[in-house]
Amino acid sequence: MHEILLFGQVPDLRHESVLKILAGLAAMQPQRVIERHAIYRPYRGQVQRASIHTGGSQVVQNAKVNRQEPQVKDLYYTKLVQSLTDDDLNSEKLTVQSNGKSTAGSWSFQFHDVPEPSMKQASQRMVAITAINEGDPNAWMNALGYNYLSEHILEGHRVVHENVIVLLHRLLRFPPEMRSRQAPREQLLPLNDLNPFKAQTGYVIQASIRISEPKPEIIKKALAELTKFKDQVKGIVDLTVVDRLSLDTRIK
Amino acid sequence: MDNPEPLTEIQQLEQIRQRLVQFIGTLEGRGSIAHYLDQYDPMPNWPLLQTSFNNATAALQSLNTIISTDENQALLRSMHVHPLPTMKKQENDNVVSSLLRKKLETDAEEFVEDARKRGEAIRDREPGTGMSTQELRELWEWAGPAANDIAKAVLVDGQDVEGEDSEEGDEEGDEEDDKGNEMDTETMCAAEQMTPLEDILRFSMTGKEPEPRTAPVERPARR
């Protein structure tokens, strides 16, 4: 699956009104979205990378070489994403039991590629999402060769307008003393106890269209629709193309 | 020109004169609307216009307050111009003739008449009715888009907004010229305080803390 993306930023003060406008535009109630993102880093990556490493500043070249070989996916940060509800956050019970079974929402394995360099009007990237139906996701990731790095909570709303998926969200994380180092935290915290990722982040608005195959005509169509949406919300939010390297998932 | 009177009256006149000079300054001097209109082509940017407009209104307001105090009103009503014989007519011809003129200049008279009529129209209106529907519609049709444009022009300066370089180039240039302008700087700070979108995205993809940045980092060219 490929994603075509545009991003924008909404100050906290305007969040409510922007959400209402989006709901009106899409003619639907915004869907609550709470996701826990656990970021993993492959530990075998270093070895493979060393074998490719030929000299000083070869990072860009490496990436080019890497993309042609399927197994070098290992060199990318990868995520486990758990979809949650408000109830999950507020409940006292553990979301990950000692046997690794999750009592809260389901997990999925998500891989995001670096956006294509050729695309200028929006960011286009390959995304792979695999649902994890049972078992201990963390143990599975470890077995795959990934180490848990950090986690954050994505909180916001989603509306869908025609083919455009709009996600208005912000990132939260656990207070520093409560962050886990080995695996995703077993117990969640109520929303109010979570810290925003940074002061003054505002909300991020992400408008995306998902396409199954990156065929030129499909991309063109998707781009046209995304641009139309961009023009529709002009003056409410400015949707822009972001630096593709800010969406870089490669390990440097 | 005036008979030697107790100091207070001179002081009263001096007060009024100062306000008048101040008001004229805001209309014609440096930093006035007229000044900016002369300087900029095609038009000065809106914060400049608004500041000079505010200055002029403030000066007019304080002049109005001074003139309309009871003592000053009484003084002005009872006062007459009386040039002394020693005053040289050749040198002060303009001043003398306009001082001795009892009636206003024709165009000024029309203007005053018009203003008075409008003022009365506003006063005679039922309290609470405010503007007519027609007037309200006119105002809003104009104000909505205008305010939007203005806000955009100001915010764009502080924020990282791409794809508007060509359109906004001129305005940005203008605004950079007056960093001193209060309103301008305030809004720009508000926009700058937001964590850059790139940092947020980077964190969401890799969990990396954003690097502290003091000066705006030069961004790699992408086009």
Image: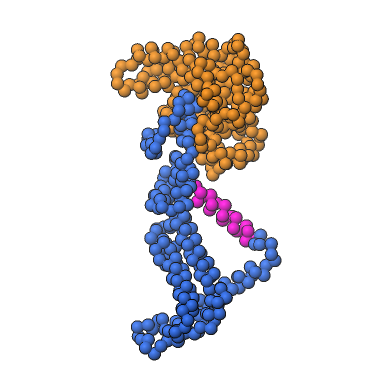
Task: Tell me the quarter of the picture where residue A140 sits.
Answer: top right
Q: Residue at x 64, y 16 (%)?
A: A103
Q: Residue at x 52, y 19 (%)?
A: A180
Question: Which chain does the orange colour mark?
Answer: A
Looking at this view, is B133 or B100 the one in front? B100
Question: Which chain does the blue colour mark?
Answer: B
Looking at this view, is B209 or B217 the one in front? B209
Asked if residue B144 lies in the magenta stretch, the reply is: yes
Most prominent secondary structure in the magenta stretch? helix
Q: Is residue B117 left or right of residue A218?
A: right
Task: Tell me the quarter of the picture where residue B96 sits.
Answer: bottom left
Give above or below for A29 relative to A101.
below
For residue A20, say whether it is visible.
yes
Where residue A241 sits: x, y (%)?
Answer: 47, 35
Q: Residue at x 54, y 81 (%)?
A: B77
Q: Which residues are magenta?
A: B134-152
Looking at this view, is B76 or B102 the one in front? B76
Looking at this view, is A219 or B165 the one in front? B165
Where residue B110 sits: x, y (%)?
Answer: 54, 76
Where residue A59 sits: x, y (%)?
Answer: 35, 22
Give above or below for B60 relative to B223.
below
Asked if residue A128 lies in the magenta stretch, the reply is: no
Q: How many marks?
A: 0
Where residue B60 sits: x, y (%)?
Answer: 51, 67
